Amino acid sequence: YMLASSAALAFLSFPRMGRAQAPGAIELGMDALLAVTSVDQPRTSSITTFDFPVQAFRMGFGLTPRISLEPTLGIHTSSGDGSFHSVTFDLGVPIELAKGGSPGSDYFLRPLIGLRSFSVEGSSSTQTSLGIGIGARVPIIPRLAARFEARYRRGFKNDNFAAFDEFGLLGGLSFFTR
């Protein structure tokens, strides 16, 4: 709830600020994630996950003043009586929705395509997903911004995994190279 409140505050407190990164600029970032995932499988309830302080690392490459290309990589490992590994790779395209203000400050829409590879006890499979996020970057100091995003992702069924719907709230930091 705290992350959702912070995201809402960012949207309401900084109206009409914004400027995406310049072409050739790089945005480095990391985000925490609170997500609720519903799996399309009988007798399966929703799953809530919280990854803090970092769920994934991202790099944004400015293509135009309003559009970036943003690969994201997340790695998760669990062990105990067995082991579980997942690697998530997303490719997003943040599109600036508001202009003006200071560098690193904007509202954005971020469509994405994702691949998630699962490995459990020697067996592995990869699942594809599509998603959309809406968010804001809020400047903290020059070249450093807080970033908040609400995201929906749909994972598609494959031979080993059921389809899923994921609703997530992300909050993190972005560092701009220029």
Image: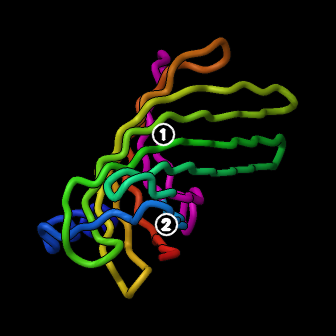
Q: Which residue is label 2 attached to? A: 25
In the image, residue 53 above or below residue 71: below
Answer whether labels 1 and 2 touch (C-beta < 8 Å): no
Q: Position of residue 136 (x, y in %)?
A: 29, 62
Outermost residue on the right side: it is: 122
Q: Is residue 53 in the magenta section?
A: yes
Residue at the spot 56% in from the left edge and 58% down from the top edge = 58
**Residue 92, visible in the rendered structure:** yes
Q: Position of residue 76 (x, y in %)?
A: 69, 50
Residue at the spot 67% in from the left edge and 17% down from the top edge = 160
Alpha carbon distance from label 1 to label 2:
37 Å
Give the camera-side residue of 21 and 128.
21
In the image, residue 66 above or below residue 9: above
Q: Which amino acid does label 2 sit on?
A: Ala
Counting labels gives: 2
Q: Is mark 2 on a helix, strand or loop?
A: loop
Q: Residue 56 carries which label?
A: none
**Residue 152, visible in the rendered structure:** no
Chain-order first, disc 1 or disc 2: 2
Query: Colour mode?
Result: rainbow
State the image quarter where residue 1 is shown: bottom left
Q: Where is residue 13 in the image (x, y as percent from the top left)?
A: 14, 74
Q: Is residue 170 in the magenta section?
A: no
Outermost residue on the bottom side: it is: 141
The stretch in magenta equals: 33-60
In the image, residue 164 above or below residue 19: above
